[in-house]
Amino acid sequence: MKAACVIGRLKDDIGDYEVEHDREYVANAVKCYMKDNASSKEKAIEKICKLIDDAWMDITEEILGPTTIPMPLLVRILNFCRSTETICTDSNNYTVIGQAMKDYIKMLLIEPIHV
């Protein structure tokens, strides 16, 4: 769950950076990294993406390795992270719903694949 929260928060911060850039009071991982390390936006996003990759590795290790946590619970956490990756892209489909997100919802709910 901790890795899932890391992925969700950091992906959202990357997607929201441009929208929240003008608001001074909003805490954002990209803005904080740029300020603390006197770096560019691109360098901050690169470092944050590395943290996201590390969180994905933690999830993968937990799912593939021996664990006492039930597999159905792990699968739900994995699916939550997958949906976060889809929703919180660089264009941030969560804050500003674009055509891509509308198409995803349409494919999922209106035109599902019948098995």
Image (cartoon, rainbow, N blue to C red):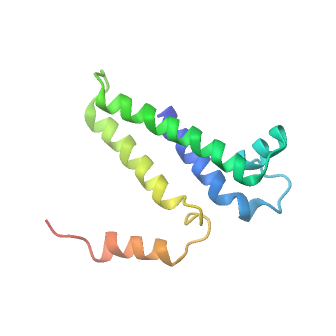
Is 94 displayed left or right of 23 in the figure? Answer: left
Residue pushed farthest left? 115
Locate residue 3, reporting x and y percent: 50, 35
> Which residue is found at the position 32% from the left and 26% from the top?
69
> Which residue is found at the position 79% from the left and 60% from the top?
21
Name above or below for residue 55 compared with residue 96.
Answer: above
Locate residue 32, reporting x and y percent: 78, 43
Locate residue 86, reporting x and y percent: 46, 59
Is 39 displayed left or right of 68 in the figure? Answer: right
**Count of numbered badges drawn on the protein:** 0
> Which residue is found at the position 32% from the left and 36% from the top?
73
Q: Nearer the viewer, residue 25 or 56?
A: 56
Locate residue 95, reporting x and y percent: 61, 65
Name above or below for residue 27 compared with residue 37.
Answer: below
Q: Nearer the viewer, residue 111 or 38?
A: 38
**Which quarter of the rendered picture does the C terminus lie within?**
bottom left
> Which residue is found at the position 63% from the left and 59% from the top?
15
